[in-house]
Image: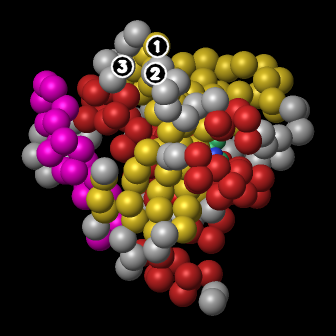
Amino acid sequence: MGGSARAAAVRTMTVIIREAGATDLPDVLGIERVSFNDPWTVGMFAAHLPPRVGAQFLVAEKSRAIVGFALSQTVMDESELLNIAVDPSARKVGIGAELLDAMMVRCTKAGAATMWLEVRASNASARGLYESRGFVSAGLRKRYYQSPREDAIVLRAELGLAVRNESVTEPVRGLVTDRDERILSTASHLPRQEIK
Ligand SMILES: CC(C)(COP(=O)(O)OP(=O)(O)OC[C@H]1O[C@@H](n2cnc3c(N)ncnc32)[C@H](O)[C@@H]1OP(=O)(O)O)[C@@H](O)C(=O)NCCC(=O)NCCS
């Protein structure tokens, strides 16, 4: 299947965002290894599965296949997005945005007011995703990454603002509810999405 045909097929299928479990780790590791030069180990992923306090580990599932994942850690009122990737065959149809939206809502529910992350300066696709979700530059870590050596841009998003994302049909204020999460999840590219 060619790139555009594959993208069209992915677009018409239901994508479910749910919490990761131990049985998802082989698929997550496969996506990690094709996405990064310096991939996390299976142990690093396993350490973020329940019952780790403050960790959120989500996967995107389509037709029973794992097509993406996202991880964060929340301490007090701050969350850090630790990792996010989408399988190359499923990119650019909105799955990364679905994962990030779901993660931002869950971190808000966990008590975070701000989300932080680091991204390679040259990673245009990730920076585009983050900017589309309201992240702004908050600093620079010189020569932070290896393989290849590169600066990291530090980005920050105010989670209250993210919940009031203008793409949401009705403005959402105050406490985030399950209903609000579904409103957010239907606001982006995919025709339908379910959140456990
Ligand atoms: C970054 C990544 C997760 C994006 O996932 P995705 O499913 O392709 O992203 P989406 O389709 O949801 O795109 C959401 C937005 O991100 C931006 N974006 C996505 N791909 C882009 C690209 N190649 N160039 C520029 N912007 C891009 C766009 O703003 C897009 O919104 P639009 O479609 O309305 O223009 C994916 O490219 C990936 O897995 N990259 C490798 C791993 C990685 O770099 N992770 C981030 C580490 S910090």
Q: Is residue 92 left or right of residue 118?
A: left
Quarter the N terminus occupies: bottom right
Marks 3/1: CA–CA distance? 8 Å
Q: Secondary structure at mark 2?
A: loop
Q: Around disc 3, counting alpha carbons within 10 Å, would you say few (fewer than 14), some (14 to 19), or many (20 or more)?
A: many
Q: Which mark is residue 43?
A: none
- In the rendered image, which residue does mark 3 sit on? 112
Q: Is residue 84 magenta?
A: no
The residue shown at (29%, 70%) is 191
**What amino acid is at disc 3?**
Ala
Q: Which residues are magenta?
A: 172-191
The residue shown at (31%, 18%) is 111
Q: Which mark is residue 75?
A: 1
Q: Nearer the viewer, residue 90 or 125?
A: 90
The residue shown at (26%, 40%) is 165
- In the rendered image, which residue does mark 2 sit on? 54
Q: Residue 71 is drawn in which quadrant?
A: top right
